[in-house]
Amino acid sequence: MALRIFARTGHPDFLDLPWDEPLEDWVHERLVDIPAGLHRHVVRFVRYDDRLYVLKELPKRYAQREYRFLNHLKQEGVPTVEGVGVVTDRRDVAGEPLSAVIITRHLPYSLPYRLLFSRRSDPELVTTMIDALANLLVRIHLVGFYWGDCSLSNTLFRRDADQLAAYLIDTETGELHPQLSDGQRSYDLELAVERTAGELLDLQAQGLVPDDLDPVDFGLALEASYTMLWSLLTDVEVFGADERYRIHDRLERVNRIGYDVGEVEIVTSDDDPDALELHLHIVEPARHRRLLFERTGLAAEEAQARALLNDIARYGAWAEAQDGVKTPQDRMDRRWYDRSYMNVLSRIPDDLWGRREGPQLFLEVLGHWASASAERGHDISVEDATDDYVDTVLRHAADEVVVEDEEAFTDMTLATDTD
């Protein structure tokens, strides 16, 4: 049977790769060593110009299934890697069948959890990682997806202002339903708690996590964060007819964490005719990302977008105070983009661009500017703050657009686990 390569348009055809060999035997000029999580299957990375792709070898049924799941979840707004294609009907030179391969696009500026722990001594790392993973699990449950394999190894993290954003990278054990039952959600969460705790126990044995980090507490904190978020988004709230302010309060809290409410349903309570029930219908989250993109054309993570929108508001207030006139919002957005955002990014040397994304760079410069100004007791120029940030921080930071050749992690590229 002939080799079949099914791939989305806009990507290479991948025909120059040695598909008649098992992935673990490949020796090819396009191969790149990238730190990766632990996988059941062999995983390799290949480069085409400035694009990096991940190849994972697994049975045909699961490869096709994972490809469909990844693209469905991406269409639903779930943060996940992009499914690019599936290679099936492979045979070696002797005519013996080989496993299928799913191809995904490497997520730029993403870091596996092991690398995060090895690089960061930030005491907030654990909290931000827990919140990011809990948010990801809530988002996939809202669209009716049962993961079945939630773990740190199956997640990638990206910087999101002073937080982290979590991306799903493995769906081969998942199930798609119109809606998940409480039992399905509970079991998926239970698996997540057990597996994340187990992964951190392994890291602890290798001396890669702080001594005061309790892996069991990490899992329990993940459960608590998930439960709190799910409750805020889905609980039916009962209130009196004279407590309409609670509707506004609930919507404000939901919007603050980046979720939109598509519909609000208020009905009389069956238990108390004088009470009302509030039902929320959550739609795709990331409202700040959408708003920032609509106003400026910038693509950012949710917390980054929220911080950038706040900076636009601060910049607008300052500019109008200086000018003494009210400026239309669309013009102020463009003015901020040209005179503030691009003013900062234009001062970043070309050889340092791979170390942070544009929105993250800008926000880190703002933080550096605020700290430096506070130390001096007066505002310094943003240009001086940017140059100082470049010299004292960015030049000493690791490259993150694609993490390559980390000595402690290169042996993980072909790693397999036995779950």
Image (tube, rainbow, N blue to C red):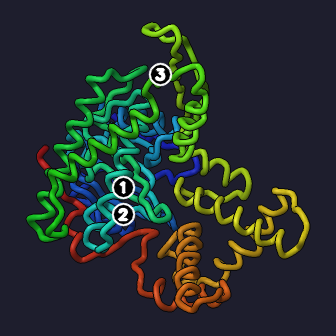
Distance from Cα at disc 3 to Cα at disc 2: 42 Å
User: Type of residue at label 2?
Assistant: Leu
**Pointer 1 with pointer 2, Cβ within 8 A:** yes
Q: Quadrant of the rendered structure where residue 367 is? A: bottom right
User: Type of residue at label 3?
Assistant: Val
Instruction: Find residue 258 and report its horizontal and vertical position in percent.
Output: 54, 46
Instruction: Find residue 397 and report its horizontal and vertical position in percent.
Output: 41, 81
Q: Image height check: is 268 above or below 178? A: above
Whichever of callouts 1 and 3 sits on the residue coming sooner in the sequence is 1
The C terminus: image quadrant? top left
- Element type at mark 1: strand
- Element type at mark 2: strand
Distance from Cα at disc 1 to Cα at disc 3: 38 Å
Q: Which mark is residue 238?
A: 3
- x 30%, y 29%: residue: 185
- x 47%, y 76%: residue: 355
**Eye-nearest disc, 1 or 3:** 3
**Pointer 1 with pointer 3, Cβ within 8 A:** no
Q: Which mark is residue 156?
A: 1
- Element type at mark 3: strand
User: Type of residue at label 1?
Assistant: Leu
Instruction: Find residue 399 and report its horizontal and vertical position in percent.
Output: 42, 76
Most extreme residue toward the left, as rendered? 205
Question: Taking the image as drawn, is residue 272 in sight?
Answer: yes
Q: Residues within 10 Å of mark 2 (few under 14, many from 20)?
A: many
**Pointer 3 with pointer 2, Cβ within 8 A:** no
Question: Taking the image as drawn, is residue 75 in sight?
Answer: no
Left or right placement of residue 403 versus residue 222 in this view: right
- x 42%, y 49%: residue: 104
Q: Image height check: is 85 above or below 343? A: above
- Disc 2: which residue: 111
